[in-house]
């Protein structure tokens, strides 16, 4: 066996679709001594984390907590709890993550009805309304707020209003939107929402904040069938994460990752939500101007592009993989490749959380200038 030594990663600048650069404060928080997961001090931290999450999501929902697993588990938690066999779910697809929602619906035994829009464009509200009107049995409307695969923002507020109007529950993917653009869970009457730690919260990967409205909780408590996932059954998780009541062992929380999550939310609270949204918008303006100077083109319409995820068209004759390789090796800079039908055609430059700052934008532009020359 070869001799093995401690792994010391290089200091990269992470400007892809996530994970984003982690604030050193968060890494320091993670390195603190591990507590027992039922230690009174840890339980206090859990309560404070829930309060900070309510702030971040703009909600009073009691069922608001971080799931001990990545964003995909948050997605699954929303679907397995709200979708029972035979339930109809209208899913809006305009990128990879909408497609994953369909997978989730089908694995719950539900029936997925889809509204498909071209990648790079928004979900068409009229098409959604037509579909809801055509089938009054639809129980849930599901969509992605910030489509990380295409850099498109969908109209979350209007989509949730349609869900209400047609008496459906809404499931919203806010993995990339939370902390980066405006999001208002109570104001927009969202029923179930999930996010991720490693995008605009700039935390380490592996945690997924979720929140459920009272309406959603009623549906979960009155299911005809058991939630088919034991680990993600909200009826059981509340025993561990529930407010006030004596905590019961459900699973061992990733204690140090929860320190990290708490610190990330504290940093967001200190900055203020609106200031964080503005910082992302400003960062995007600066990046877009610099890319324009380099002759590079953003693919998404400025009315609905995501400031935190910039999709850049790869110029004719430029080799995608070798550019990204050179950025990584010579500049310690990671940018994202195109996903799915966009593979090889675009780069995705993330400006998420701690990574969204002028120094990084200058570094990225200088590196691109050097590599593309
Ligand atoms: C990253 C992402 C996910 C999945 O999150 P993981 O933490 O990778 O499981 C889901 N939806 C969107 C929109 C994402 O950007």
Image (cartoon, grey):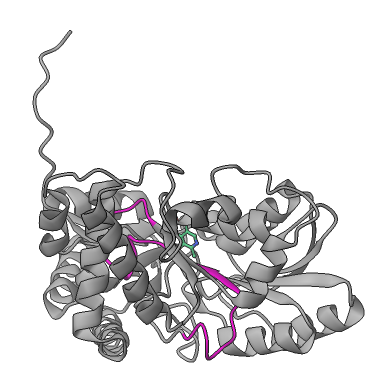
Estimate the x, y position of residue 240 in percent, counting from the top left.
Answer: 44, 52
Q: Is residue 221 magenta?
A: no
Q: Quadrant of the N terminus?
A: top left
Tell me where the magenta segment starts and ends, as one range.
Answer: 184-207
Estimate the x, y position of residue 287 in percent, counting from the top left.
Answer: 26, 81
Location of residue 283 by image quarter:
bottom left
Q: Nearer the viewer, residue 326 or 197?
A: 197
Q: Is residue 143 visible?
A: yes
Q: Quadrant of the C terminus?
A: bottom left
Q: Nearer the viewer, residue 354 or 67?
A: 67
Location of residue 202 by image quarter:
bottom left
Image position of 115 (left or right of 324): right
Image position of 195 (left or right of 227): left
Image position of 114 (left or right of 182): right
Q: Is residue 189 magenta?
A: yes
Estimate the x, y position of residue 290 in percent, counting from the top left.
Answer: 23, 82
Residue found at x 81% / y 52%: 85
Image position of 154 (left or right of 169): left
């Amino acid at each position: 066996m070869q001799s093995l030594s401690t792994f010391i990663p290089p200091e990269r600048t992470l400007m892809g679709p996530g994970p984003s650069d982690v604030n050193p404060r968060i890494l320091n928080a993670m390195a603190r001594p591990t507590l027992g997961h039922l230690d009174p001090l840890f339980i206090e931290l859990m309560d404070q984390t829930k309060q900070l999450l309510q702030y971040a999501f703009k909600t009073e929902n009691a069922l608001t907590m971080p799931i001990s697993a990545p964003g995909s588990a948050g997605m699954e938690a929303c679907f397995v709890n709200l979708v029972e066999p035979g339930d109809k779910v209208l899913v809006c697809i305009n990128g990879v993550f909408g497609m994953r929602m369909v997978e989730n619906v089908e694995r719950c035994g539900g029936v997925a009805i889809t509204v498909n829009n071209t990648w790079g464009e928004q979900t068409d509200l009229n098409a959604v309304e037509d579909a809801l009107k055509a089938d009054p049995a639809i129980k849930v409307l599901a969509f992605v707020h910030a489509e990380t695969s295409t850099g498109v923002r969908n109209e979350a507020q209007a989509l949730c209003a349609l869900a209400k109007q047609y008496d459906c529950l809404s499931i919203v993917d806010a993995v990339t939107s939370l902390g980066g653009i405006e999001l208002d869970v109570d104001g927009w009457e969202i029923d179930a929402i999930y996010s991720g730690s490693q995008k605009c919260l700039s935390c380490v990967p592996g945690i997924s904040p979720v929140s459920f409205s009272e309406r959603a909780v009623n549906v979960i408590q009155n299911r005809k069938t058991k939630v088919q996932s034991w680990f993600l059954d909200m009826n059981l998780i509340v025993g561990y994460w529930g407010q006030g009541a004596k905590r019961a062992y459900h699973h061992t929380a990733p204690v140090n990752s929860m320190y990290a999550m708490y610190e990330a939310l504290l940093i967001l609270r200190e900055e203020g939500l609106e200031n964080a949204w503005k910082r992302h918008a400003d960062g995007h303006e600066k990046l877009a101007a610099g890319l324009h100077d380099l002759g590079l083109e953003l693919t998404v319409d400025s009315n609905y592009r995501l400031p935190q995820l910039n999709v850049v068209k790869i110029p004719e004759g430029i080799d995608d993989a070798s550019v990204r390789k050179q950025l990584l090796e010579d500049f310690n800079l990671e940018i994202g490749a195109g996903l799915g039908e966009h593979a090889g055609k675009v780069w995705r430059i993330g400006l998420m959380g701690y990574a969204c700052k002028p120094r990084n934008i200058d570094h990225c532009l200088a590196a691109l200038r050097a590599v593309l020359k």
